[in-house]
Amino acid sequence: MPSYEIAVIPGDGIGPEVICEALKSLNALAPRFGFTVDLRSYPFGAEYYLKHKEVLPKGGLEDLGTAKALLLGAVGDPRVPPGPVEQELLLALRFHFDQYVNIRPSRTWPNAPIPVAVPEGAEIDVLVVRENTEDFYMNLGASGDGGHLKATLPVRRGLYSGEAKIELSLDPPSEAAFTLGVLTSPGTGRAAERAFSLAEERGERLLYSATKSNALPHIYGFWDRTVAEAAKSHPAVKLKNINVDNLAYQLVRAPQHFGVVLCPNLFGDIISDLAAGITGGLGLAASANIGDGLSMFEPVHGSAPDIAGTGKANPLAAILSVSLMLDHLGEREAAEALNAAVETYLSKSPRVSLPYELDGGAPCPKVGDLVVRAIEGHL
C-alpha cells in the first residue's frame, strides 16, 4: 500500500480553516483508494514570524524537503508589513525547490455564478500554465534618488548564481527604480514542455502562448522563439502566440474558446486570477507549484483576515488543491473522484448548503462535511 508523507502549512487567517476541510477529503479518499498519508504540520507564517522574528528556522526548508508534497493554506497578516513572509516563505519555497511551473485550472462549476456570457451548452475550461521562477519575479531591483543610479545585485535564484550590475545616469536628476526581468532557454523551455504535455493529455489541438513581444521584443521575443522551438516536439498541438492584453480581452468576451494557456511569470499571475474571476471566484481556484523535487499545492485566495473565524471561508479551492496533489502523486483515480465529489456537492445541494461566496449559507466546516458525504456516495 503506497504511503505519502505530506507536509502541511495551514498558515494564517482562513488558511487553517480551509486546510482542515481539505484534509477531511484527503483522509476520506485514502482508504477508499488504497493509500495512506502521514501528515506533518508546520507553524510557519505570520504568527511564527511575529513570535520568533524569523520566517523559517534554520534547516526548515531541508526538513520540508523530505516530504512527498506540501499542502499550503494561506499566509499573510496585516500585522506584518508586505514582504518578509511572501519573499522568505512563498518565494523561498518556489526557488529553493525549483518549482518551475505553476498550474491553475479554471472551469465552470454547477451553481457557481459566472459574470460573463457563454453560449448555451458551452463550458469554460481554461488551464493556465505559468513559468514560475524567472521573468520579473526574481526580486532583482533597486531604487535611488539623484543623478546616478548604480546597483550590484547578488543573484541566488533558481538557475542563476552570480551578480547583476546596473548603472543608470538620470538627466535631470530624479528618483528612480528598476527591476530586472530575466528568461533563460532552460527555464522557458521546461515550462513550455509541461504546457504542451498537458495540452496533449487534455486532447487539445491548440496551445496559446501569451506575451507582449511587440512592446518588449528582447525578453518576450526570446520567449516566443524558445516556445516555438519546444513546439517542434509536439506536432499534434498547434502553437498560437497572442498578446497578453488581447488575451485578457478575449477571455472575458469568449472564454469558451480557450484551453491551455502558457504565460511568463508576471502575466501568468494576472491571467490566472482573471480566469478564476470568470469561473466562480478565488474560492474555487486551486493551484499547483510543480518542480522535480518537492511540489507545493495551495488555494490562491490568500489569508482573508477580514473573514477569518466567521465561518464564511470557502474551502473548495483548498479541497481542489488536494485533487491536484493526488494527481501529481500518481493517485489519479482518487483525484478524479474528488473532483467528481465537488461537482456532485455543488449540483445537488440546495442554495442554503452552498458556501457564502456562492450566495449560500453553509459555514466552512459544513461544506467540507458535505464534500466528504459526496465522496462516500451519500449525497
Image (tube, rainbow, N blue to C red):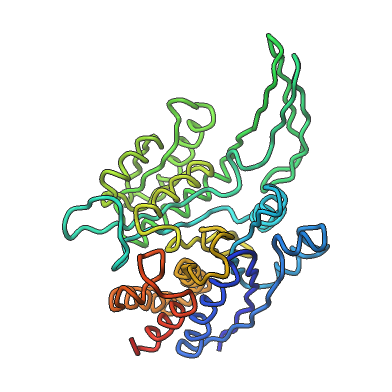
Q: Residue 363, position in %: x, y? A: 46, 75
Outermost residue to the left: 120
Quarter of the image with the C terminus is bottom left
Q: Residue 212, position in %: x, y? A: 45, 32
Q: Residue 321, position in %: x, y? A: 49, 68
Snapshot quadrant of residue 16? bottom right
Q: Which residue is depicted at the point 43% across and 77% down? A: 367
Instruction: Tell me if 151 is positioned left or right of 338 in this view.
Output: right
Q: Is residue 335 above or below residue 108?
A: below
Q: Which residue is depicted at the point 50% across and 42% down? A: 264
Q: Which residue is depicted at the point 33% across and 50% down? A: 237
Please count the marks in the image. Answer: 0
Quarter of the image with the N terminus is bottom right
Q: Residue 239, position in %: x, y? A: 35, 43
Snapshot quadrant of residue 36? bottom right
Q: Is residue 79 above or below residue 173?
A: below
Instruction: Tell me if 125 is positioned left or right of 212 in this view.
Output: left
Q: Which residue is depicted at the point 57% across and 66% down? A: 308
Instruction: Tell me if 263 is positioned left or right of 178 in this view.
Output: left
